[in-house]
Image: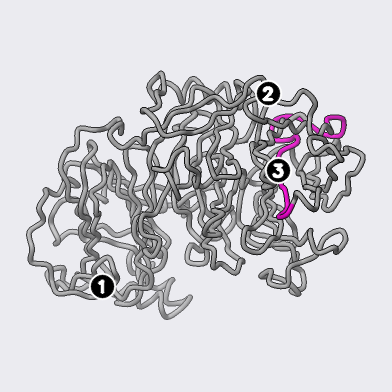
Amino acid sequence: MMRQACALAAGLLALAAAACVPLPDPRETGAVVTDKGQPAPVATAVPLRENVALQGSGVASTRDEHGELAVDTEMIRRALDGDPDTFWNSHQFAPQWFSVQLDDFYLVDRIQLTVTQSPAGPTTHEVWLRDVTGVATLHKRFRNVYTEDGQTLDVQVDPPRNLNEVFVFTVQSPSWVAWREVNVFGTLSGHADGEENRARVELVPAAAGLERPVQVTHAGDGSGRLFVVEQKGRIRILRDGVINELPFLDISGQVSCCGEQGLLNVAFPPEYAVKRHFYVSYTDVDGHTVISRFITLADSDRADPESEEVLLVIEQPERSHNGGALAFGPQDGYLYIGSGDGGRPGRHAERAQDLSNLLGKILRIDVESGARPYGIPPSNPFTGNDGIRDEIWAYGLRNPWGFSFDKETGALYIPDAGHASREEVNFQPAASTGGENYGWYAMEGNRCFESTSLPCRAAEYTMPIATYSRPMGCVVVGGAVSRGTRAPHLRGVFVYADFCNGMVWALERPDPDVEGAWQNRLLFDAPFPVSSIGEDEEGNVYVVGYGDGSIYLMSEGQLAEGGTPRSKRAQAYCQQCRQAISWSD
């Protein structure tokens, strides 16, 4: 089998042939590569904790006799037995993954990955940690690190994390992906419920009696008002805890609802108080996405429904994955638009990788320069390229519902709905010049997507920073960065949720100068489906209860109680929520 694989590789390219050279003697060990990616002397210090990977199990990617993606649960033990003379080999080139599933929750402070590789050369690996919140976060990326057989990649976990899985994703390598040993050092924590890591958060009721609310936001005009979008076609004003009797805008007669369709978002431009116009995203009666501008009347609590100016229509092939989120960039003042891929895998999902259409993308357009219907920012990444839509800012997304900017830093968080296995959160730094490919429909979360006709070129994609699997939830929703005074202990964290099970999390990177090192905390389990997370002008964060028609302010307080265990909550809510709105179809 090995000789056949080598012969085939040699016929394709010389590099592949070299990759099949027999591996060196496993006793010939090399240097340690630290988590800073720099060579270091061979480690001589004895780890302070035990190697808990020995008590765990493993799962790794492989391919079956038909060449289809599969998993290995048997041969993987060779890299988890504590014996460097044995090793696990995927017999495949990158991308490949390797998962250490611990038998309990352990307080882990160190991970060591011993390389099996021939020939030597640059490799890229990602180390993901799944903790008590059920969410796996990107902890460390070894990017283009020179490695050779016998070297050890040393990963410090400081402070120690309460984990039950270590996931290693090899993005690129000059040889087949293989490991001599994967060691995880830690001690039994006894905290499987994660209560010790919860932030102290109180949910303060802010409004009730709304019908299918899907967004809460502000106008940035100093009025203190909150604007709540109701999916059937109305925007309501919430002031001092009271909902105005008359809607700010009512276009119910021209909106298709519901499921993933409806009036979905409103965005107010910079200096709205002077400009007195705003933008909405909705599904029209033909099932297509419409981006329109409306004008505010002399009464600032009312808008003119007859003032509509349609800027952009995105034709939708299906009733699902229509996107609909809107936001103005805090640094450039351009309008960003989230567009879903327009359909299910095998039918329309490949459109997310097709730059000739607007589906499965983040768009960026100039709606405030006076150009009609809109202008194209000259710094958009694909401007002037034949066959590529100028509006595209980023692509490779399935349904980016609820993306959000950090108003202070300009960074962009993009929750993206998965297909059947994983939900994800992506991160775009403020310095980005656009053009990122987030991988769908070749990848789902941090793994190659099984049901795809596209090659999985992970090295070309921008990987997510957080992911969680089904059936823990059904679809990720966002999102806002907390910058307000009501929960100062959450300042700078990205708050997001799962629509079905009501879990609300906080995602943060304690050191913004370190690539990776993302950490996740469970804030609370909401006893209702959460359709979105929003913010007021001061940066205080609000939770939108889709099922109960309520808005809640997050405030510092006691631990928020979830009522029922999470596993039961997920089972109880997921079926109810999928019937109410098909975000995850």
Q: Is residue 328 left or right of residue 257?
A: left
Q: Most extreme residue toward the bottom, as rendered?
A: 14
Where does label 3 land, which residue? 322
Residue type highlighted by circle 2: Leu
Q: Nearer the viewer, residue 430 or 18?
A: 430
- Residue 529: image quadrant is top right
Question: Label 3 to label 2, Cα distance in Å?
Answer: 23 Å
Label 3 vs 2, first from the N-terminus: 2
- Residue 222: image quadrant is top right
Percent x, y of residue 6:
37, 71
Tell me which segment is drawn in magenta: 252-271
Q: CB atoms at circles 1 and 3 under 8 Å apart?
A: no
Assign the magenta stretch its main secondary structure.
Answer: loop
Task: Specify few, some or many for label 2: CA neighbours under 10 Å numbering under 14, 14-19, or 20 or more.
Answer: some
Where does label 2 land, which residue? 210
The secondary structure type at the circle numbered 2 is: loop
Residue type highlighted by circle 1: Pro
Residue 210 lies in magenta, yes or no? no
Label 2 vs 1, first from the N-terminus: 1
The secondary structure type at the circle numbered 3 is: loop
